Structure formats: C-alpha cells, structure tokens
Amino acid sequence: QECDWDGGDCIEFNEEYPGCPAREPRQMGDGVCNDYNNFPGCDLDGGDCLEDSIISNVEYPNCVIGDVFGPTLLGLLGNGICDGGEYNTPECGFDDGDCYEFNAKYPGCNVKHPQRVGNGECNGQSNKQECDWDGGDCIEFNEEYPG
C-alpha cells in the first residue's frame, strides 16, 4: 500500500474504506475520476467516478458537500444508501430521505458511513454511545478493552 501502514498513516483511510484496493488513495475524492481507484469498496474513487455526480442543486439549494456550492457533487443524494456526514443534514434533505431510518434508530449519531453501523464489525468512528456502540458491534470489544 502507498503508505505502508507506517506510523499509523493508513489507519483513518482503512477505517473509512476497509478493503479498498485503491492504487493512489490520496487522489480519492479530488474531483478527478481515476480508473485505478474506481472500485465499489473505494466509493468509486471517493465519489469522483459517479456517472451523474454533477447535478443541479435546485431541490437543495443550501446543500454544500465539501467546499462546493451551487452545482455540486450530489450523485450520492437519494441513491438508497444513507451516506452520512455532510449528506445527512437538513440542508441536504437527510441524504434526500436515505437517512430517515438511520436517524430514527440512532439519533445524534453523525458518522460519514452510517451503513457500517451494525454491520457486524466494530468500527472506531461509530463506537460511541449515540451510535449505540456501533449498533452493538463494539460491545464485546469495549468489555474486553474498557476505557
């Protein structure tokens, strides 16, 4: 891997994209579709390779993803998956409705990848009370390693 997991350089990336075989992880989500990072496990190059990722922002004029405003990367809105983070906000219609069920089940759980909550693996970013200890996935871990 590019960062060879040295000094913890890849911890955050591997938590965000477990199993992602990206050749150039630092180029993911940079606005350019790179074929060598375009895998489902890599969120299609961090969203850069979504077919209709540039759409009009008429329905959600105040929805801002990253530092883009107006016509923006909104291809993940309303795609049937609760994408979380900046998508799971009132301004973005709670991911155009995709996050309603998640928000009802885990109120106050604001994570970038809600689909990983309760997926059978303990994920560090959602191992907190408001996420019900990663949907229960981290209870055993927390009992074994308290504090």
Image (tube, helix red, strand yellow):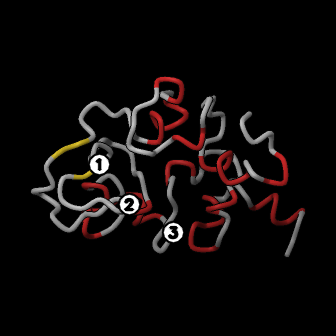
Instruction: Write the residue at 53% across / 36% down.
Output: 42
Above or below, 112 relative to 27: below
Question: Residue tagged by mark 3?
Answer: 109
Question: Residue tagged by mark 1?
Answer: 73
Q: Which residue lies most toward the top here?
A: 35
Q: How many marks?
A: 3
Could you tell me if the residues under marks 1 and 2 are in contact, i.e. CB atoms within 8 Å? yes
Instruction: Write the residue at 30% across / 41% down.
Output: 79
Q: Residues within 10 Å of mark 1 (few under 14, many from 20)?
A: many
Q: Amino acid at mark 1?
A: Leu
The quadrant the C terminus occupies is: bottom right
Q: Which secondary structure, mark 3?
A: loop
Q: Is residue 137 left or right of residue 4?
A: left
Q: Which secondary structure, mark 1?
A: strand
Q: Which mark is residue 66?
A: 2
Instruction: Write the residue at 60% across / 34% down.
Output: 24
Q: Is residue 32 left or right of residue 69?
A: right
Q: Which secondary structure, mark 2?
A: loop
Q: Residues within 10 Å of mark 2 (few under 14, many from 20)?
A: few
In the rendered image, residue 97, in percent from the top left (x then y), is placed at: 27, 55
- What distance separates the C-alpha of mark 3 from that of mark 2? 20 Å
Q: Amino acid at mark 2?
A: Gly
Q: Which mark is residue 103?
A: none
Q: Residues within 10 Å of mark 3 (few under 14, many from 20)?
A: many
The quadrant the N terminus occupies is: top right
